[in-house]
Image (spheres, rainbow, N blue to C red):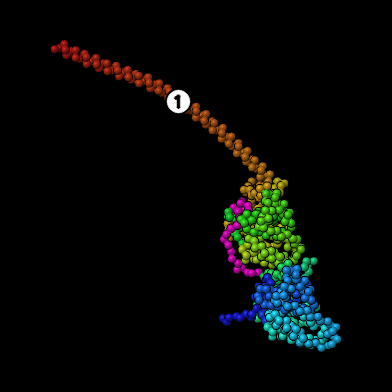
Amino acid sequence: MPIAHQISKSRTGIQGLDELTGGGLPQGRPTLVCGGPGCGKTLLGIEFLINGALHYGEPGVIMAFEETAADLTLNVASLGFDLDDLVARRLLAIDFVRIERSEVEQYGDFDLEGLFIRLGHAIDRIGAKRVMLDTVESLFSGLPNQAVLRAEVRRLFRWLKDRQVTAIVTGERGSEPGALTRQGLEEYVSDCVIMLDHRVIDMVSSRRLRVVKYRGSTHGTNEYPFLIDSAGISVFPITSVGLQHKVSSLRVPSGVPELDAMLGGEGYFKGSSVLASGTAGTGKTSLAAHFAAATCRRGERVIFFSFEESADQIMRNMLTIGLDLAPFVEQDLLRFHAARPTHLGLEMHLATMLRAIQAFDPQSVIVDPLSSFVSLGGHNDVLGMLLRLVDALKVRQITGFFTSLSAGEARVEKTDAIVSSLVDTWLMVRDMEFGGERNRGLYVLKSRGMQHSNQIREFSLTRHGIELRQPYTGPAGVLTGSARLAQEAQERSALLSREQEIGRKQKELDSKRAAMEAQVAAIRAEFASLEAAALAVIDQAEVSEDLLTQDRQDMAQSRRAEAT
């Protein structure tokens, strides 16, 4: 197969943008960045120049037609960018060109030759490799002749190519449907076109970026959320990374020893995704807090994203079950990020979470609950967002623990977030109503790659944490709460009765054994007496026989003597 050759590229240094463009913007060619007001066009261009000057040894020139050098410097200072310092070090040049529409209309003729001379001088003065023109509409705002305008636009882009500078030209979004720019020409003569969008849906704003075209290079074609914060622009490519991530055979404890036993005795797989779903009040957040505490005790870091409770409220509530999370927060092993789900759109929530994960580099992430996102979009939007979040965690080998609220009238095996198929281990916590009581039950619905229990275990939230009880089945099925206690009391009573009956039988046997042994002793005594009497008679008979024999012998001897 022939070897594919990629064009040379200039890295932007903007998080995520180099990834989705395959290495940066086309080197020595112009790139059009277009979009509506407030979408971040100027900031993207300035970051491109700053990163080039500071990190890639490529000085840059800003030629602005709307904002002065002082305005630009002040605007980006809040993001930590010091343009004055770069200008002083001859790494950046800023040139403000004032163009009045009335003057262009008054004199009629329009020629960019003066602009080329001015821009060329700035490039040569500092040896610039990068250029930003902001914005192109201002440059051609007074031209009523479309033929002249198109010719000059082409000429401008050709001049930038001839100077072999990597240029960003910003442009405002066109008013016509489908138009990227007002003139409708810049996107055709640009080698790369990036469209920025700042939209508001259901009173929630979000920013998105799309690479419309990129000559000579493959690139991401979807819309990607991007974030503007104190660190500048961050683009988060959210297309699924596929199923190429590595897996680990290491196990991490859940924080509940009895639950670990249900999962083969060792807990979850490291880098896997765990879902705890159930109705309200069943202990999902408590399970998440146990997992967080267990992770922190090993000296590992955890991020806890909460969309229903504040950090202080969670820490206070967990104290009632014996979990003190405050020391882990003080040690910076545990960080909370609490926000209302309606504060941002789905993409911005994802972008914010990924930004926090990248900054903290945790070993575990908790999201409580996933079902909060259901109100922010349709089924496919929510599923896509969660799929990308799970994939991002697995690629980094981060163990994810998610909670999800199940509607009371819905099937227990169905979650509102429709995320169950994405997770590796699914814990179901549910209400078990029996005998007029409401108790909690837990079972492992699935756990990929490991043996796990199929039992439903009652669990309680005690002052010592979550305690899982051994499964208990009565005549009517699994018993919980006071019904379980009553049945256990009945069985203890029955056991006590059996033990008492056994005691009585044992005493009866002991008594009979003693009587029998007494009778045996009496018989033996009687036998011994009879035996002694018999032996005495026998002895006396034997003595009498001996005397009789002796007498006969004596008599015989006496008779022989007389005969002699």
**Farthest front residue?**
88
Q: Quadrant of residue 553?
A: top left
Report x, y in % for residue 393. 64, 64
Mark 1 burial class by Cα count in 10 Å: few <14, some 14-19, many 20+: few
- Give me the residue at 57% from left, 82% from top: 2
**Number of dots carrying numbers:** 1
Residue 421 makes an appearance in the image? no
Q: With respect to residue 547, does 174 lie above or below?
A: below
Q: What residue is shown with label 1?
A: 521
Quarter of the C terminus within the rendering: top left
Q: With respect to residue 321, does 13 lie above or below?
A: below
Report x, y in % for residue 466. 66, 50
Tag 1's secondary structure?
A: helix
Q: With respect to residue 158, does 299 lie above or below?
A: above
Report x, y in % for residue 382. 71, 65
- Give me the residue at 65% from left, 43% from top: 487
Q: Quadrant of residue 65?
A: bottom right
Q: Is residue 253 magenta?
A: yes
Name the one closer to the observer, 512 or 287.
287
Name the one closer to the observer, 71 or 305.
71
Give the residues in magenta: 240-261
Q: Amino acid at mark 1?
A: Ala
Q: Is residue 561 magenta?
A: no
Residue 124 makes an appearance in the image? yes
